[in-house]
Image (cartoon, rainbow, N blue to C red):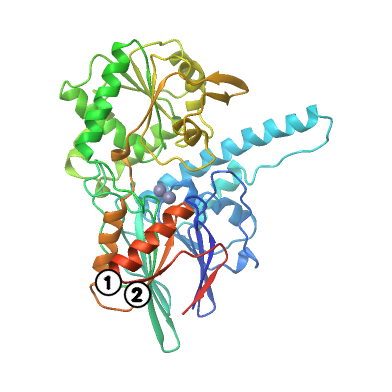
Amino acid sequence: MKIEFIGGVRQVTGSCYYLEINSKRLLIECGMTHNNDDKLAINFDFSEIDFILLSHAHIDHSGLIPYLIKKGFKGKIHCTHATAELLMIMLKDSAYLQKKDAEWLTKKEQRAGRDVIIEPLYSIDDVSKVSNYLYPVSYNTIITLTEDIKTRFIDAGHILGSASIELWCREGNLEKKIVFSGDIGKKNNPLVKDPQNVDSADVVLIESTYGNRLHRNKQESIDELVDVINNTIKNNGNVLIPSFAIGRTQDLIFVLHKLSLQGRLIKHRIFIDSPLAKEATLIYSRHKECLDEEAIIFFENLKRHTLNITFTESPEESQKINEITSGAIIIAGSGMCEGGRIRHHFKHNIWRKQCSIVFVGFQATGTLGRRIIDGAKNLKILGEEIAVRSSVHTIGGFSAHADRDELLDWLKVIKNRGNPLKVCVVHGEEETSLKFCNFIKDGLKIDATVPKQHEVISF
Ligand SMILES: [Zn+2]
Ligand SMILES: [Zn+2]
């Protein structure tokens, strides 16, 4: 048995791990990187891959699936039912963005006198084929992939449908249990259930997005958000919140709605400026099996339009928000500000000192979001130099990821079963993963490593 770390090591995005078990070939995740330098460096034919196991729908875990199919993948893709639905809208959105980017780049080449046509990695047509390969599974059910490989998806509490993946593998007399954590959520997340624990494993791949940080207390984060919103609106400004369309946006509208009900926010209007977020919210409302009680009632009310939230779809509706100079809370993608409508809202608001930008999610190195957090005074947005004069806030308590201690607790449960355990730290920026690895080795006395890209571990 062996694992090769194709991507998503020493960086957060681009998750992809290759497993070879008894001559069967599996990929866990098939994600895109945030800087679009994706080639999926696998040195054999994609048609030889038997299975893809997908922990959740986020594009950094799933974004290359249509590309793989286009290049010959013929196997089965397993994920939860909710992930299967979210995946399709996520990939369609990705294909649409790639098409726009490719058209823009092609024009740029042609204007420079070069006859070059830039092709997207895949088209909407390619995406529509993905559903033929999807074999959704229910949580907590053992699925037989082959005589020698069984798998089970358990709730990871990160976004709707998210899972940790357990794999029982046999090769001759050798039996091993491999566990992939997926993205692990926080306990008491507003909508989805708490992450489930895994009770045993021989090899664990664990995420480490916040492996070197402790989140601030949730209540403090909510109080800070209330202060930022109320102060901004009092100063006649708008609040901009860049957010992933799937997961974070639904968490945020739930929290904002609750604050409105409690009368803690002064007069405001909430805009969710993302067609993708609207579709995702509908999918959330349909998958009651993944939601807690309070969330089910919330989505019923949202369906009946009894909440003070406007979902904007068309570009015209989106542009209309630009006319609003105060009192608006605008939630838009992309989460790390690398694309999407948030950039238009930045252009119209970020130069005004009355406005605020609130980051509630992780911003990877090299992204526009990170540059703003790091204090950039000027930014090039949509081809224009824009001054950053609005206030910038990072509120960590809304993260959809477990923090260091929660990740260590998750590992402790497995360790307590007493098996010799090998832990591979993945899905984190290099420095964070290395520090988290030391916490595992020193604190839990577990054999741990941070693999390099293309490193192979055999067992
Ligand atoms: Zn995720
Ligand atoms: Zn992730």
Q: Which mark is residue 415?
A: 1
Residue farthest toward the left in the current orientation of the protein:
262
Q: Nearer the viewer, residue 232 or 295?
A: 232
| Amino acid type at image mark 2 | Leu
Q: Compared to 76, does 334 lie above or below? A: above
- Residue 415: quarter of image: bottom left
Residue that appears at 27% across and 28% down:
225
Q: Nearer the viewer, residue 63 or 92?
A: 63
| Image coords of residue 137 (percent x, y) | 36, 60
| Image coords of residue 94 (percent x, y) | 54, 41
| Amino acid type at image mark 1 | Lys
Q: Nearer the viewer, residue 183 or 357?
A: 357
Q: For label 2, count other residues whose C-alpha is less than 10 Å away and answer few (under 14), some (14-19) or many (20+).
A: some
Q: Does label 1 or label 2 sit earlier along the sequence?
A: 1
| Image coords of residue 193 (percent x, y) | 24, 49
Residue that appears at 22% across and 39% down:
218
| Image coords of residue 180 (percent x, y) | 39, 64
For label 2, the SS is loop
Is label 1 in contact with label 2 (beta carbons under 8 Å)?
Answer: yes
Q: Badge 2 is on which residue? A: 421
Q: How many marks?
A: 2
Residue that appears at 55% across and 19% down:
386
Q: Compared to 88, does 327 lie above or below? A: above
Q: Is label 2's Cβ within 8 Å of ligand 2?
A: no
Inter-mark Cα distance, 1 to 2: 7 Å
Q: Compared to 52, does 255 lie above or below? A: above
Q: For label 1, count other residues whose C-alpha is less than 10 Å away and answer few (under 14), some (14-19) or many (20+).
A: some
Residue 285 visible somewhere in the drawing? no
